[in-house]
Amino acid sequence: MSVSASSTLPEGSAVSSDGERPPRLRTRWAVLAADFMVLCLNYADRAAIGVAAPYIIKEFGFSETAFGWILSIFAVSYAPFGLIGGWAADRFGPRKAMGWAALAWSAFTAATAAGAGFISFLIIRILFGAAEGPQATVTAKLMNTWFPRQELGTAIGIANAATPLGGAVGTPIVVAVIEATNGNWRAPFIIFGVIGVLFAVGWFAVVRDTPEQHPWMKPAELREIHGAQSGTAARAADEDAGAEDSGATDKAGAEEGEKSSALPGMWHYVARPVIWATALAYFGYAWILNVFLTWFPTYLVDERGIDLGHLAVAGSIPWIGGCIGMIAGGVATDWLIRRIGAAATVRRWTIVICLILTAALFGCIALVGSAVEAVALMAVIIFLLYFTGAQYWTVVAEEVPGPRYGSVAGVVQFIAGCAGFLAPLITGAVVEHAHSWATAFTIAVVIAAAGALLLAVAGRGKAAQI
């Protein structure tokens, strides 16, 4: 699928037939801001368990394998609820799907403070995972609905940049609260839970499922959004399906919300090689991310001798790299596509190249000579990893029409979410029984590199063909 700079008017220059320009402050950016805030909190909540891990392990006497189960059980429910979240966003709308999920995960964040042993932690974490599961696919659905195609990489990149920012902000906040409460690891979970309820209220106030439903929406912005989406959809049908003009028009209508019953089921799109290869590459991405998210603070404390005060800084630096990488990846690929076209190729090879580089560098973490070098290298790794973060969702958008997007993205999220279960569990077991962080990191390298290479050879599907 190819999008050229001349196919759409530059942002801010679209003028309707009656001379009306889109407003300077577009409603879609307010929706994006609300999503950004909710996702930032989502990852602050998720990162809290990694920062509090040394205290929890010490208090309850958990082994690395036992605590690995506590970390991994999150993904047993997180992975399927990513799939369910995509379906719910298609069926009930992203506003309800994300809003109720945010209320639920905030409640279970606070409930973590009630953990009293191995079984209770398992139950709380599996419920927490179910509540957090929908966020990625609901975000992808929301951005795909609200943004013109030429802005989609930027929008998804900015939205998902909130996740590493949440880790960067959440890590020092958790450390500060624990220090201020004389080692009380429970306090930050309660505080984050209360904040989450307030954020959910703000979400319901700002977000609507579609631009047409929003009371702030101006007609000129609505034409700007749907004009670009329709043109892209029509070109996709012409270029990739060899359709007649009438067929392209029908495809454009489908992208804008025609009856989804006219489209094939989601498995028609999931079966395309580029979709399942993207899912497996995303699995490799998620493996490295979850090793970092759940075990890197413990690695710094146990293997590198970082104390709690320094952990607040050391644990945050890589997340900052990730935040920059996520935004940069979305903006850079959108810019490149506007210049040269070949959207699907640009997005796919961004994943392949950056994920291979990420894997190669991740294998060096245990080999560097100091904690400072390990943190600096991890910042580069997370930057490269998150540079690909928006691209998994935009690759799906190039292949799948809007009414099926949430469900297909949910399948991709489910496959990647399985890494959230396996990575923390296997990493903990390897560290305990093999006494080797290097071995655990090597496993991550192999999995991520394999996913990238598979996507490289999987080929390009026919974009958004019915």
Image (spheres, rainbow, N blue to C red):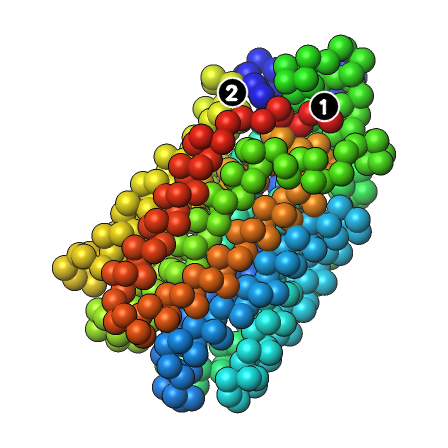
Q: Which mark is residue 230?
A: 1
Q: Which mark is residue 297?
A: none
- Give the x, y percent position of residue 288: 39, 54
**Which amino acid does the dot numbered 1 rest on?**
Ser
* Tag 2 and tag 1, C-beta contact below 8 Å: no
- Residue found at x 44% / y 30%: 457
State which quadrant residue 198 falls in. Answer: bottom right
Binning the other alpha carbons within 10 Å of mark 1 as few (below 14), some (14 to 19) or many (20 upward) gives many
- Give the x, y percent position of residue 120: 57, 84
Residue at which label 2 appears: 342
Q: Is residue 86 left or right of residue 274?
A: right
Q: Is residue 250 left or right of residue 290?
A: right
Q: Which residue occupies the foreground of this view, 35 or 49?
A: 49
Report, in whole angstroms, how far the alpha carbon at label 2 lies from the one at label 1. Answer: 18 Å
Decide if residue 176 is in sight here. Answer: no
- Give the x, y percent position of residue 263: 79, 32
Q: Secondary structure at mark 1?
A: helix
Q: Which residue occupies the foreground of this view, 130 or 444?
A: 444
